Amino acid sequence: MIPKGKRGKMLTVEDGFLICPRCGHKVKRITPDESADRVLVYCKARECKSEFYIMISEGRCFESRGQ
Ligand SMILES: [Zn+2]
């Protein structure tokens, strides 16, 4: 399990896609049973281009804080 202290705020997953917290575009496919400690996500939206780390816990996504 992911230590609670490393979790940032919960991110929106809609229709199986992670939604970019900055612009609202779909950025990554998330499956309901997916878990990962630290994943680099890149938003391809032309006006956004955000890059950020997330963690995934059984299909729920959180911002990743620090190392
Ligand atoms: Zn974005």
Image (spheres, rainbow, N blue to C red):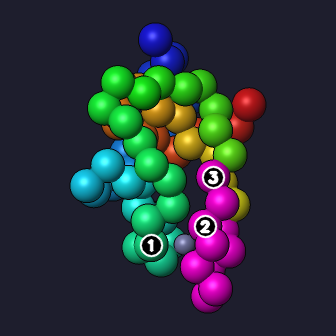
Q: Marks 2 and 1: CB-CB under 8 Å?
A: yes
Q: Position of residue 45 (x, y in %)?
A: 58, 79
From the top left corner, tell me how far across and down residue 57 is, in percent.
41, 26
Q: Residues within 10 Å of mark 3 (few under 14, many from 20)?
A: some
Observer-nearest residue: 4 or 1? 1
Q: Earlier in the sequence, mark 2 or mark 1?
A: 1
Q: Is mark 1 within 8 Å of ligand 1?
A: yes
| Residue type pointed to by label 1 | His
Residue 38 in the image: state x and y as whole percent: 64, 32
Separation of marks 2 and 1 at Cα, in angstroms: 7 Å
Mark 1 neighbour class, 10 Å CA radius: few under 14, some 14 to 19, many 20 or more: some
Q: Which residue is mark 1?
A: 25
Give amino acid for label 3.
Val
Q: Could you tell me how far apart the alpha carbons at marks 3 and 2 are, in whole angstroms?
A: 7 Å
Q: Can residue 57 be seen at all in this image of the molecule?
A: yes
Q: Which residue is located at x 60 percent, y 67 percent? A: 43
Q: Amino acid at mark 2?
A: Cys
Residue picked out by circle 2: 43
Outermost residue on the right side: it is: 67
Image position of 7 with respect to 43: above or below: above
Residue 16 lies within the magenta run:
no
Quadrant (top left, top right, bottom left, bottom right) of the C terminus: top right
What residue range appears in magenta?
A: 41-50
Q: Quadrant of ligand 1?
A: bottom right
Give the label on residue 41, or none.
3
Q: CA distance from mark 1 to mark 3?
A: 12 Å
- Left or right of 18 on screen, residue 65: right
